[in-house]
Image: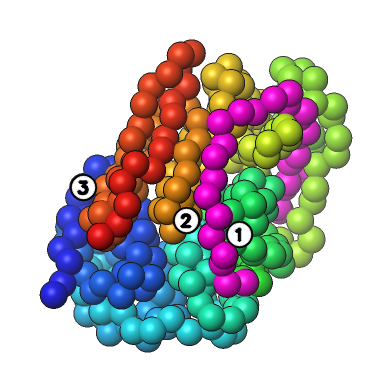
Amino acid sequence: MLLHVDGSMGEGGGQVLRSSLSLSAITGRAFRIDAIRAGRSKPGLLRQHLACVRAAAEICGARIEGAQLGSTSLVFEPGPIRAGSFAFAVGSAGSANLVLQTVLPILWHAQDVSEVAVEGGTHNDWSPPFPFLAACFAPVMARMGAPVDLALEAHGFYPAGGGRVRALVEPADWQPLHWLERGEVSLSAHAVVSGLPLKVGGRELVALDRALGTGRGKPHQVANPRGPGNACWLHARFPTGDAVFTGFGRKGVRAEEVAAEAIDAYTDWLGRDVPVCEHLADQLLLPIAFAGEGCFRTVEPSLHTRTNADVIAAFTGQRFAMTRETRGAWRVELTAGGE
């Protein structure tokens, strides 16, 4: 019997689809999703969402209906998960990292080691950039018993794309996560430019240093760029983990404004004395559900995070409590077991 998923629930974006694909493959529950990305200005499947569908289907041998560009409905009937060597391409500057985050949970449930390469955007606004995955997401996954070795083989920026990420994924031995304390923070600043003057990244690093005393460092220039692009980020290290805060360069936006995006996100997180940033909070829900136990402290959960919790509940019956504490901090905790 198909589980019916409302693609317009909550934030009404691609996360509903991506989490549904991962959970369907892992639980074996077939689903139909309608109103895909109904909350977006261009509803339906774009290239990066279609890449997620096809990648998940290949790994678990799923039967699919409605997997076309622009489709607002999809049926996904999974088969058994298989390990192997996989290569996927978004076919645009859409996020390779979101495709990777769709298939990683599936491959962690395989019986053997897998390798997966994805081509597309690697430093995209509105999606986790590669530095976040490598410095923030992967370490906490290893801590939870789900190792992944990530490599950036080529940078990809909007609109040219052309990036490539590779992951070596070992089967998971899930461990609960209890992440409530942070401790003293040390900070470093980074910038990368592609097909643009190196001084753009240099100005960002100067702005980050003036605001936060990071040290000015040197920006990285992408060799053989496919197109113009730029990002800067702050890497916060503390005794219990890491956090990454990014600003993305865009046409007509000054370097100092790009740096300010990272600064604002970092200072908001710092002032709340929590270990988990807004974006990682969303991505910890699935692993905690797999482990069957866990909690963490974070900033106020985004609609993205709350929607992801609703998708998990629909597939597994597992529910998260989100409780406000002092200073704008929140505690997120798995409270109910699956069916």
Q: What residue sits 61% from the left and 71% below the top?
A: 169
Q: Is residue 61 above or below residue 280?
A: below
Viewer-nearest of discs 1 and 3: 1
The numbered disc on residue 9 is 3
The numbered disc on residue 145 is 1
x then y, percent, for residue 295? 47, 39
The numbered disc on residue 291 is 2
Q: Quadrant of residue 70?
A: bottom left
The answer to whether the residue labelled 2 contacts the one labelled 1, judged by CB atoms less than 8 Å apart, is yes
Q: From which residue to which does the magenta span run?
A: 170-198
In-front residue for pair 134/26: 26
x then y, percent, for residue 261? 57, 29
x then y, percent, for residue 144? 59, 54
Element under label 2? Answer: helix
x then y, percent, for residue 235? 71, 37
Q: Quadrant of residue 320?
A: top left
Q: Amino acid at mark 3?
A: Met
Mark 2 packing: few (<14 Cα in 10 Å), some, or many (20+)? some
The answer to whether the residue labelled 3 contacts the one labelled 2, judged by CB atoms less than 8 Å apart, is no
The answer to whether the residue labelled 1 contacts the one labelled 3, judged by CB atoms less than 8 Å apart, is no
Q: CA distance from mark 1 to mark 3?
A: 31 Å
**Mark toward the start of the polypeptide (2 vs 1):** 1
